[in-house]
Image: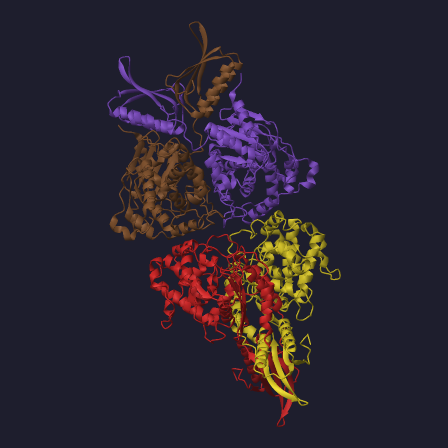
Chain colours: A red, B yellow, C purple, D brown
Amino acid sequence: MHSPIPDYLQEVLQSCSGDASGHVADYIPELARADPDRRALAVATVDGSAYSIGDDELAFTIQSISKPFAYALAVDDIGLEAVLDKVGVEPSGEAFNELSLEGGTGRPLNPMINAGAIATHQLLDTAHHHAGRHHAEPPAHTAPEHPARTGQVRQRTARALAGLSAFAGRELSIDYAAAQSEYREAHRNFAIAHMLRTYDIITNEPAEAVRGYTDQCAVLVNVSDIARMAATLANNGVHPDTGERVVSARAARQALSVMATCGMYDASGGWLAAIGIPAKSGVSGGIIGVLPGQVGIASFSPRLDSTGNSVQGVEMFRRLSEDMGLHLMSNEQPSNTAVRGIRTITEEGVPISRIRLQGTIRFSGAERVLRSIVEAGSAGRLENRIRIDFSRVESLSGPGARMLGGLLRSLRDNGYDVVVHDPEGLYPYS
Amino acid sequence: MHSPIPDYLQEVLQSCSGDASGHVADYIPELARADPDRRALAVATVDGSAYSIGDDELAFTIQSISKPFAYALAVDDIGLEAVLDKVGVEPSGEAFNELSLEGGTGRPLNPMINAGAIATHQLLDTAHHHAGRHHAEPPAHTAPEHPARTGQVRQRTARALAGLSAFAGRELSIDYAAAQSEYREAHRNFAIAHMLRTYDIITNEPAEAVRGYTDQCAVLVNVSDIARMAATLANNGVHPDTGERVVSARAARQALSVMATCGMYDASGGWLAAIGIPAKSGVSGGIIGVLPGQVGIASFSPRLDSTGNSVQGVEMFRRLSEDMGLHLMSNEQPSNTAVRGIRTITEEGVPISRIRLQGTIRFSGAERVLRSIVEAGSAGRLENRIRIDFSRVESLSGPGARMLGGLLRSLRDNGYDVVVHDPEGLYPYS
Amino acid sequence: MHSPIPDYLQEVLQSCSGDASGHVADYIPELARADPDRRALAVATVDGSAYSIGDDELAFTIQSISKPFAYALAVDDIGLEAVLDKVGVEPSGEAFNELSLEGGTGRPLNPMINAGAIATHQLLDTAHHHAGRHHAEPPAHTAPEHPARTGQVRQRTARALAGLSAFAGRELSIDYAAAQSEYREAHRNFAIAHMLRTYDIITNEPAEAVRGYTDQCAVLVNVSDIARMAATLANNGVHPDTGERVVSARAARQALSVMATCGMYDASGGWLAAIGIPAKSGVSGGIIGVLPGQVGIASFSPRLDSTGNSVQGVEMFRRLSEDMGLHLMSNEQPSNTAVRGIRTITEEGVPISRIRLQGTIRFSGAERVLRSIVEAGSAGRLENRIRIDFSRVESLSGPGARMLGGLLRSLRDNGYDVVVHDPEGLYPYS
Amino acid sequence: MHSPIPDYLQEVLQSCSGDASGHVADYIPELARADPDRRALAVATVDGSAYSIGDDELAFTIQSISKPFAYALAVDDIGLEAVLDKVGVEPSGEAFNELSLEGGTGRPLNPMINAGAIATHQLLDTAHHHAGRHHAEPPAHTAPEHPARTGQVRQRTARALAGLSAFAGRELSIDYAAAQSEYREAHRNFAIAHMLRTYDIITNEPAEAVRGYTDQCAVLVNVSDIARMAATLANNGVHPDTGERVVSARAARQALSVMATCGMYDASGGWLAAIGIPAKSGVSGGIIGVLPGQVGIASFSPRLDSTGNSVQGVEMFRRLSEDMGLHLMSNEQPSNTAVRGIRTITEEGVPISRIRLQGTIRFSGAERVLRSIVEAGSAGRLENRIRIDFSRVESLSGPGARMLGGLLRSLRDNGYDVVVHDPEGLYPYS
C-alpha cells in the first residue's frame, strides 16, 4: 500500500500535459537545448514530508526562482532597513518604465524584477562566505572568458550558493558553462547594472554585478530542491528536513510578501486573485509557490508562454489551488471551537471549574476562550477555583498564549484561584 | 470581571493617539467639519464576537471603504468574467498614468482606484434591488439639485446600500447632504466617468455614474459596522452574526485578493510587507483590515497623511499586527499533529488498529495522517481492521476531507476493513 | 493667357488623387456624410494674391485647424504670460500620458492638443465680443438641447467666431447642427474639461468649456478661407487682403512656433523634418501650412489615415514642399549682395564715395554692407564725404536698419560726412 | 574706423555677464576645472564673415554640440532612410521614459538625446576615414586604460573628427585625457549602449560604442569654431570660408529640423517659441544657434542652470534674437516687389514690353512676377514682343526659376515673342 498523494500529483501532472503551446527559452544554448516534453511536480510540507513525480531528478538552472531566496538572505545579512534603502517592495504595474526604477532615486521597484535582483545580489554580505564549505570553483582555464569574476564577486556568489544550498538542504552547484553563455548575452542586465551604478544603488563595477547575478541564476536544481526551498520559506525560514534556520522568520515573511505582490511580474494581481499562492517563476521552466505555514510546491515544464511563464506549470498550480483549496484568501477552515467545555467537577470536596481547551489555539481561538470564560463568569457559573486544561491542545501560537496570559491575570486580579494543567508544556507563562 | 480584549484595544488606541500630524480632508464641508481628535478601534471575529472602543458610535461616510464590498457584490451580480471584462486586478504601480486606465482598452487597472470603483458601481445589477426594503429616498424637494438621480441610478444605489447593509448586518442609510456636496466637487470623478464612457467601459450617462458612486460613498457607518463588514469578508461572505450569506465565497476571496495587492494604492506592496493584512482606507478616516478566516479589524481617526491614509489608523494596524502576529505571511502556527496516536486495541477478540485524529485537519494535516498510516502499513503495524476515530477532531476542511477520502479508498483497495468513528459527522464520505 | 500657378496646383492635386486609402471620420453624422472624393488646394501669399482649385467652395467645419488661430487670439486677449500660465508649449511626445497634462500642475502640454485647445478657448476675452457684428445665434427652438450655452459661453464663441472671421477676411458662420452632434459624442473632451477643472486650469463649468470649444470647431470654412487664414499668420498677423491687423506680430509668431513643434501631434518632428512647413490638420480633412513671410497653403481631402491626418493632403504638402523648395530649414536663397558698388564720384568739385545698396537688406545683408565699408575705410578708399544710396533697395528690415544706423553713427564719429540718398524713405533714422 | 558689430556683440556679452547663478559641470575633473567667469560670443555669416569677442580662443570640449553635426554626417554616410531606421526624429516630451527609447522598437526618439547620439555615432561609415589626414592618435602608453578603442572604434572616431574639422574649417583635435575621465564615469551612457544592443539598434560592443561617442564629445573647439560649424549648417552644408561641401543640403536641412524640435531637450518647444533659433547646447558651456541661410551663432559660458544649459549663453541668445529680429517665425522682411516696372519701349520701330525684375526672387517673388504679367496681358497692355530684364536681379532661387520658366512657356504658347535679358546669367533656362 502507498500514499495516495503521489497518485494525485501524477494525475495533476498528466492532466496538464496536453497543452503543447509555448516555446522553450532560446536566447542561450543551454536553455534552448531543454527537452520541451520533460515535466515534474513536487510538494514539500513544513513538517518534512516531500513528494515528487515526473522528471524530478532533472537538473535545470534556477534562474529567477533564486530571487526571493537571495532577497531573504540579504535581509538577514544587512538588515531590512538597509535593503529597503536600495530596493523597494512595490509592484511595477504596467510596463511603462523600461527599467522599473523609481523616479528620482533610481531604486528598483522591487526585488522580483531583474533590476531589483541585481541590486539585491550586491547586498549579500561576503563575510557570510563559509570558508569551510568547498564549492566547485570556476575552472581555471576559462579565466580569460571570466573577466569580472574577482575576489568580491566570487565571495558574493559563494554566499548566494551556500544560502541557496541551505534552503534546499543539500549542496548545490553552479553550471558555469550556462552562466558564461548567459553573461555573454546579458545586454539588458548590463544596461540595468550601469543605470543602477548611475544612481549609486550599486557601487561596484557593473560587470561584476552582472557576473555575480548571472552565476546565482545558474545554480543547478531539480524540482524537489525548489519545493523544499519553498517549504523552508513556508516554515518560517527553518528547513523542514535539516532543521537548519536558513533565514530569520522576519526575512522569510518579507520574501513571501514580495512574492505575493510582485512575484509574477505584471500579472501578479491576476495570479494572486486566481491562484492565491505567492509564487515565482523562472525562464528555465520552473515555478514555485508557497502557502505560509503549510507547503512549498514546485512545477517544471520548459514551454513558456509569451510572458515567460511555464504554460503547463501555470496549469498545474491552477489545478492544485482549485482541488486543494490552497487559496491564501479562501477560508475553508471552519471556525475553531477552542473550548471543549466548561464543567464543574469536585476534587477533594472542592468545586472546580474545569475548562478544557482543545486543538490549535491562535488569535481567534484565544479570543473565543476569553469570551467563553468571561460569559461564564458574568453568569455566575465559575467556581472560585479554576483549572485550565491544555491536555487536548495540540498547539498554541504566540499571540494565542499572550491573550490567554492576559486572561489569567485578569481572572487572578478578580480573585479567582487559577491552575493550569498543561502536561505538554504548551503554555509559556504559568 | 470582563474580557481583557477591550483593555488591550484601549491600550493600542491610547498608544497611537499621540501623533497629531496629518489633516482632516477638507474638500467638502461634511468632511472638513470632522473633529480631528475622535478615534475608535473595533475587532469582529468570524464566529461573531465583536469588540469596539473609543468613539465607536460616531457615524462617518464610508467613502473608499465601500469599494471592496461593491466589487464583491458586482462579482456575484454579473459573474467574475463579466466584471474582469470591465475592471482589471493589477496594481497601478507608480502614478505614471493620470487615470490608471489600461492602455488600449481603457479598462481601469483595478477596482480599488476611483476609475475602477466607478466602473464597478455601474456593474451592480439593478434586478437585485429588494423591493421589500425601504431605504430613505433622497428628499423630494432637493430634486433640482439632483439632476442625475434617475430611476436606474436610484436602483443601483439601492442595490449598493442594501448590499453594504447586509455586510454590516444592519440597515445603513445615506447622508444625502454629504453626497450632494461631494457630487458638486467631483471634477476628477466626472473626468474619469467621461473617459470610461469613451472606451465603452460604462455605457450610461457619466453624470449618472458619478451620482451613483457618490451616493455609495456617502453611506453612513461607524467603526463597528465596518469591522463587521470586514469580518463578513473574512468569514467567506457569511455575516458572523446574522448568518446571512451576503456574497459567495468566490466573491469574498476575489475582493480580498484585490485588497491585498491594490488596497493601499501606490503603497500596497509596502503595506502588505510591513503589516501583512489586506486592507482598505477611506478619506473620512477609516481603515479596515481582513485576516481571512479569522477577523475583521477597523480603525477610525480622521487626520490623514499626505497619501490620504489615516495617520493614527495606520499606527493602530501596525501595532496590532506586531503584537498579535497577524501578518498573513507569518507562520507562527506550529505544525498540526493531526494524528494523536495509532494503537492496537482488541474488541470482541478482534484486533483493531485505532487511529485517533485530532484538532483541525486541513490539507497539511490530512497529508500527515496519510503519511502516518502509510508508514504504519509498510511497517506491518496495521491490523486488518482499522477504525479511524474523528471524535477529537474539531474541524475538517474540504481539501482535508477529500484527501482522507482518497486514503480510505486506497486502504479498502488494499483489502483493509476500514470503519469510521465520527460522532459529530465531520467526515462527509463515509 | 493665364497664370501657370493654377495649372501647377491642378497638377499637384491630380497627382495626389490616386490614393484612395483612409476613411472619412465617422464619429458624428455630419462628418460621416462627407464625400470622400472631394478635394481642393489653395495658396495665398502675404501680398494678397490667392489661388484655389478643385472643390474650393465646398464648406466644411474647421475643427482642429481653429486651434492655432484661437491661441493667437488668446495671446493678444490676455497676454502671453497669462496664457503660458495655463497652457504649455512643449510637444507631448509619445502618448504616454492619456490626457497630455503636465505632471503636478495639470497644465496641458501645448495648445495643439485637445486639452490645450479647450483651455485656450476659455482664455478668450469676452470683452472683445464686437457688439456691432451680428452673427447667427443658435436657433431659439433648440434651447433644450443646448443646456450649456449660457451668456459667457456665447460671448466666448462670438469672440472666437469674430476672430476666425477676421483671419479669413470674411464673415464665417457656425454649423450648429454639427456642433450639437459633436457635443453629444464629446466624451473625451468632457473628461478633459473636468480634469482641467480639477487643476483649476479652467474655472467655469466643464460643460460650458466643451460647448464653447465644440462651437469653435464647427465654424464653416472652405479651402480658400483657411489658406487666407494661414497667410495672415505668415504675414505677421495682418490680413493680406483686408489689411486688418488681426493679431499682433508677437501672437502670430507664437502660434507659428507652436505649430512647428506640436502641430502634427506625435509626428510633429517627422513632419517638420520631411515637409518643413509649420502645419495643422483637422479631422474634417483640411490641412494648413504656413511659410513665415511668404505663403499660406491649404489642402482638403476627407480621407484620413490612422493618425487622423488627410491622406491626400499630406501628399499634396509633400509634393509642394519638394517642388517649390518650401522647407523652412532649406537655404536655397543665394546670399544677398547688398552692396552694388562703392565708387568715387565728383560733384561740384567735391569727391564723394557713393555706396549703392540694393535688394532686400536684412541682418546678414546689413552685415555685408558694414563689412564692405569698413574694409574700404581701412584701405583708405573712402572719401571724407560719403553718400549712401538706397534707391535700388527694395526693402529694409528693422534689424538691418538698426545695424546700418550703427554704421552711420560710427562713420560720423570717425569724422566722415555721411549723406543718405533714400528717395523711397526706407531708412528710418536719417 | 572699425565695424560696429564687435561693439554690439561686446555689449551683449557684457549685459549678460551679471548673472553668476548656475554651476560648472563637475562630474569629471576636466569640466570641473573650468573657470566659471570665462565667456565668449561669436557670429559667422553664410558668406564668410565672422566675428568673435571675449574668451574666443579658449578651447573646450565640444560635448553635445557635436550631435547635430555627427547626425548630418551619418545621413550622408549611409542615407537618410537607413539612419531613420535606427534613430527617430520626435521630441522626447516630458521625461516619462528613463532612456527615451521608442516602445517596442527600442529606437532612440531622436539624435539630440544621448541614446540617439550614441546610436548615430555607430552609423558613421568607417570607409570615410581619410587615410591622408593624420590626426593625433591616442598615446600608445595609455593602452591598458583604453580597452575598447579597437580598429573600428578608431576609424569611426577618425571619421567624426575629420567631419567636425571640415565643419569648423580647420583641423581639430581630441582631448584624450578628458575623454578618458568621461569614459570612466559614463555609467548612464553604458546603460544606454547596452540597452541599444538589446534592441539591435547597435550591433557592436557597447563599450566600443561608448568609447567612440566619448571621444567624439572630447573634440576641442573654441567659440569661433562652433560658430563656423553652425554657419556651415546655415549655408546648406558648404563651409562659408573654405567652400568645402561638408554635407549635402539634404543632410544639413535634416540636422537643422531636428535641432528645431529636439535641440534643447524637454524645453525645445519653449526655446523655439521664445528665441526662435534652432539650437544645441553642450555641458561644457557652449550653445550654438543656426538661422538657415543667414548666420551661425555661438556663445560660451560654463555656468549651467539646472537643465544643463549655460545660464549666460541662454541670455545672450535671448538678447540677440530680440535685438536682431532673428526669430525663425518672425516676418520682419517686408514683401518683395520683384517687378520694378512694365513699360513699353520702342526699339528699331518695334514696340517692346520691357519687364524689369529686381532683388532676390524666390517662390513668392516669382508668384508676384507671374501675377503682374498675367494681369498686364489680360488688360491688353502687353506688346507682342516681351523683354524680361534680369539685370537688377541679385539672385534667383531654384523654385523661383522654375516658376518663371513656366511663365515663359505659357507666354510663348500664347504667341508672345519673349526675350530674356540676363547679363549675369541668373536665369537657367533661356
The location of residue D273, given as percent across then percent down, is 45, 38
Q: Closest to the observer: C127 or B43? A: B43
| Quarter of the rendering occupied by the C terminus of chain B | bottom right
Total count of labels: 0
Residue B96 seen in this snapshot: yes
Residue A278 pos. (x, y %): 54, 65
Above or below — where is C340 with respect to D109? above
In the rendered image, residue A159, in percent from the top left (x then y), is placed at 40, 67
Q: In this view, does D243 lie above or below D131?
A: above
| Residue reaching furthest to the bottom | A348
Q: Which residue lies furthest to the right in this view?
A: B132
Residue A342 falls in image quadrant: bottom right
List x then y, in percent, for residue B1.
60, 81
Camera-side residue of A157 and C134:
A157
Residue A275 visible to an observer of this rendering? no
Q: Judge from the rendering whether residue B114 lies leftward or rightward of residue D148; answer left or right.
A: right
The image quarter containing residue D393 is top left
Residue sitting nearer the eye, A267 or A343:
A267
Q: Quadrant location of residue D360?
A: top left
